Image: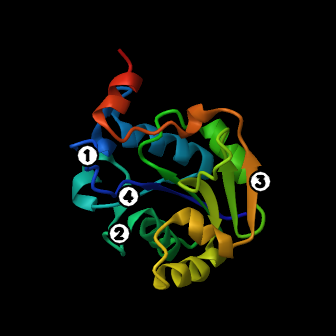
C-alpha cells in the first residue's frame, strides 16, 4: 500500500487569537508534535498551509489550493498533491495524536476513506485516511457549495472505526481550551 501523511495547518485560528499550529508544546510547536506522529505512522508528513509560516520547522509545506474553503479545501489540496493511494490527514490542533493510534486507522484502509467515530458518535474526518480516488467526489461536493467535511463524506464509501476515547480528538480552538489542556 502506498501511503503519505499530511497535517492541516491552515485556518485562521480566529477563536485562538494566534496561530494554534505554532503554540508551544513538547519542546517545540504543536504542529511539530502532530507531524511527528503522522510521519511515524505514514512515513512522511507534509504541512498544508502557508509554507512561509512553517518552513523553519523542517517539514515540507504546500500552500492551500482553496484558501478560505476550510478543512475540506485543505484535504483536497493534500489529495491533489499526493502520489500515494492512501493519505493520512490530521489537523494540527490535536495534541494527543499518537503514531500508534494513527497506524490503527491506516491498517483499516478500505473503501474511499477511513474515519474514526469518537465517543460522541460523530465522525472525526480531520483525523482520517483518504484514498486518492476520493478527490473527485470531494471536489464535486465542494463545487456544490458543501464546506462541511462530514457532509462531503456522505458521497464516499467510508469505513468507520469506533474509538472509545475522546482524548485523541481533543483539539484546542480557544485560549480557554489551551489553558485547560496545556501542560502546566
Name the spot of residue 67 as percent of width and height, x first: 31, 71
Name the spot of residue 36 as percent of width and height, x first: 48, 41
Q: Provide the residue designation for mark 3.
A: 108
Q: Provide the residue designation for mark 4.
A: 60
Of marks 3 and 1, which one's residue comes earlier in the chain? 1
Nearest to the eye among marks 4 and 3: give it.
3
Q: Secondary structure at mark 3?
A: loop
Of marks 1 and 2, which one's residue comes earlier in the chain? 1
Q: Secondary structure at mark 1?
A: loop
Q: Label for residue 97?
A: none
Of marks 1 and 4, which one's residue comes earlier in the chain? 1
- Above/below status of 159 relative to 76: above
Q: CA distance from mark 1 to mark 2?
A: 16 Å
Give the left or right position of residue 71, taking residue 17 as reference. right
The C terminus appears in which quarter of the rendering? top left
Q: Nearer the viewer, residue 3 or 116?
A: 116
Name the spot of residue 115 as percent of width and height, x first: 67, 55
Q: Label for residue 64?
A: 2
Name the spot of residue 173 as percent of width and height, x first: 36, 42
Residue at image point 33% right, 61% down: 49
| Labels 4 and 3 touching (C-beta < 8 A) | no
Nearest to the eye among marks 3 and 1: give it.
1
- Above/below status of 132 relative to 87: below
Nearest to the eye among marks 4 and 2: give it.
2
Question: What crowding class fits label 1: few (fewer than 14 Cα within 10 Å), some (14-19), or many (20 or more)?
Answer: some
Q: CA distance from mark 4 to mark 2?
A: 13 Å
Of marks 2 and 3, which one's residue comes earlier in the chain? 2
Q: Provide the residue designation for mark 1.
A: 19
| Labels 1 and 2 touching (C-beta < 8 A) | no
Of marks 4 and 3, which one's residue comes earlier in the chain? 4
Residue at image point 51% right, 36% down: 170
Give the left or right position of residue 63, taking residue 108 as reference. left
Amino acid at each position: 500500500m502506498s501511503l503519505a501523511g499530511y497535517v492541516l495547518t491552515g485556518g485562521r485560528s480566529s477563536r485562538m487569537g494566534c496561530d494554534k499550529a505554532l503554540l508551544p508544546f513538547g519542546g517545540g510547536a504543536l504542529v511539530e508534535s502532530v507531524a511527528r506522529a503522522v510521519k511515524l505512522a505514514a512515513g512522511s508528513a507534509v504541512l498544508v498551509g502557508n509554507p512561509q509560516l512553517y518552513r523553519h520547522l523542517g517539514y515540507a509545506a504546500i500552500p492551500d489550493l482553496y484558501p478560505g474553503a476550510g478543512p475540506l479545501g485543505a484535504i483536497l489540496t493534500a489529495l491533489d498533491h499526493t502520489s500515494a493511494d492512501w493519505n493520512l490527514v490530521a489537523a494540527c490542533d490535536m495534541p494527543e495524536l499518537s503514531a500508534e493510534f494513527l497506524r490503527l486507522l491506516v491498517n483499516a484502509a478500505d473503501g474511499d476513506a477511513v474515519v474514526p467515530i469518537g465517543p460522541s458518535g460523530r465522525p472525526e474526518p480531520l483525523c482520517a485516511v483518504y484514498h486518492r480516488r476520493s478527490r473527485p467526489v470531494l471536489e464535486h461536493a465542494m463545487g456544490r457549495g458543501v464546506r462541511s467535511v462530514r457532509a462531503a463524506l456522505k458521497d464516499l464509501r467510508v469505513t468507520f472505526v469506533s474509538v472509545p476515547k475522546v482524548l485523541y480528538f481533543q483539539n484546542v480552538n480557544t485560549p480557554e481550551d489551551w489553558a485547560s489542556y496545556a501542560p502546566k
